[in-house]
Image (cartoon, grey):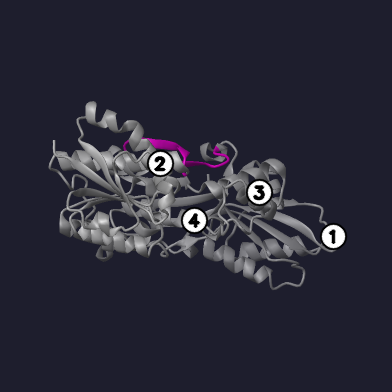
Amino acid sequence: MAAVNIGLVGVGTVGGGVVKALDMRMDYFRNELGLDMRLARVADKAAGRFAQLPVRDAACTADVNDILNDDSINVVVELAGGTGFARTLVLDALKRGKHVVTANKALIAEYGPEIFEAASKSGVSLYFEAAVGGGMPVIKAIREGLVGNSIYSIRTIINGTCNYILTRMAAEGQPFADVLKDAQEKGYAEADPALDVGGGDTGHKVAILASLVSGGYVPYGAFSVEGITGIAKEDIEFASELGYAIKLLGVIKKNDAGLDVRVHPAMLPGSHILASVSDVFNAVLLEGDAVGQILIYGRGAGEMPTASAVVSDIVDAARNISGKCPIRVPMDYYRADKKVGVLPVEQVKSKYYLRFNVCDKPGVLASMTSRLGAEGISIASVMQKEGSGADSVPVIIITHSAVERGVRKAIGEIEKEQYVRAATQVIRIEG
């Protein structure tokens, strides 16, 4: 088999894990799988990192051009992150006829069509298993293992930071801000956590998954993304009392109305399989027309879990190169001219948890239910709790399935009333 030389760019947390994993498994790949693979060059601006890693005989450099200009490099592994330098690097490598492996979810979600087109023109492939779900083989499952299915539903908990925060809030009754601070101190949340807790990280991954199952291109930004910053400890407590758990959920559904894609906090029945996914763990629940439900569960981030996915892509690339089948699983459909329309969130149908803070006086509940009824919203249950102050009480209403537009309109009308003391909390319920 032809030799496969690897150039690795970025040896931070994940890149360092890849070097370690390759060192542990390289002899196995050669002797048992017959793959003549070699880590030929490693690039990182922080030169001090090289001495801490088992790079073997790889040439170490601070200049990425040493990799790009080396014609013997077959596979470039991009683990620098971001969408500036990384985009330029990936496009340059592809145009030079080098296969690329990346864990960069933002890059694929925001610039996927441009990148896959460049790969196709050069007759090479871009591998991105680690971009969604860390060590969980979600991309491979969809593109290969489940190719005999039409996947019509994905519900996923795909951000470990948010899941850790919500798990701690539920277990300990602490407010969001306190748990976030603790997560940052433990390294589970970034110093600037906005991309995670704001839902953007989940949104990038969901955009990729939605594109894969829809057979077209679902742009990041084409669907509603909500984070967990507005979830109060009271909502966690009320949800538990009602038999639900709150999770940040990515939802992809194919139905008669169109492709439903969204990211938001959701209440799940305590018996739902995703309700038990806790701490930093991730899960992807897929439903196919032939296979039914499949759950993929595991660590969605971290040094070695993500490195595991990157190394699996490197091995795939080596096999395809050696087998003279460089584009074995094509991505031709991931193009800007095959953009898939997404159902506007206003047209989504769901059950809802509504928490109103209102003045405690006669006629308030009747007024609220009347406004909801005027929009055709049927009420499943009502719970009124004692308030923290004499003039304000929380009223929780659980609705039957309703259209989002009607729910928002009814809330808008209710919030015009003088008896309302705070903005209404709205959480969708998934079953």
| Comparing labels 3 and 4, the label whose residue is closer to the camera | 3
Mark 1 belongs to which amino acid?
Gly
The reply to whether residue 423 is visible in this rendering is yes
Mark 4 belongs to which amino acid?
Val
Q: Residues within 10 Å of mark 1 (few under 14, many from 20)?
A: few
- Residue 118 lies, in percent from the top left, at 22, 61
Q: State the SS at label 2.
A: loop
Q: Residues within 10 Å of mark 2 (few under 14, many from 20)?
A: some
Give the Cα distance between marks 3 and 2.
30 Å
Mark 3 belongs to which amino acid?
Asp
Q: Which of disc 1 and disc 2 is earlier in sequence?
A: 2
Q: Which of disc 2 and disc 4 is earlier in sequence?
A: 2
The overriding secondary structure of the stretch rendered in magenta is strand
| Comparing labels 2 and 1, the label whose residue is closer to the camera | 2
Give the Cα distance between marks 2 and 1.
59 Å
| Along the viewing direction, whichever of 268 and 400 lies nearer the viewer | 268
Query: Where are the magenta residues, as a range?
Result: 277-301
| Along the viewing direction, whichever of 249 and 208 lies nearer the viewer | 208
Residue 406, quarter of the rendered image: bottom right
Q: What residue is disc 1 on?
A: 389
Q: State the SS at label 3.
A: helix
- Residue 121 lies, in percent from the top left, at 16, 59
The tag on residue 53 is: 2
Q: What residue is disc 3 on?
A: 182
Give the Cα distance between marks 1 and 3.
30 Å
Q: Cβ–Cβ below 8 Å for labels 4 and 2?
A: no
- Residue 153 lies, in percent from the top left, at 40, 46
If the image is split into quadrants, where does the N terminus sit? top left
Q: What residue is disc 4 on?
A: 263
Mark 2 belongs to which amino acid?
Leu
Q: Is residue 12 magenta?
A: no
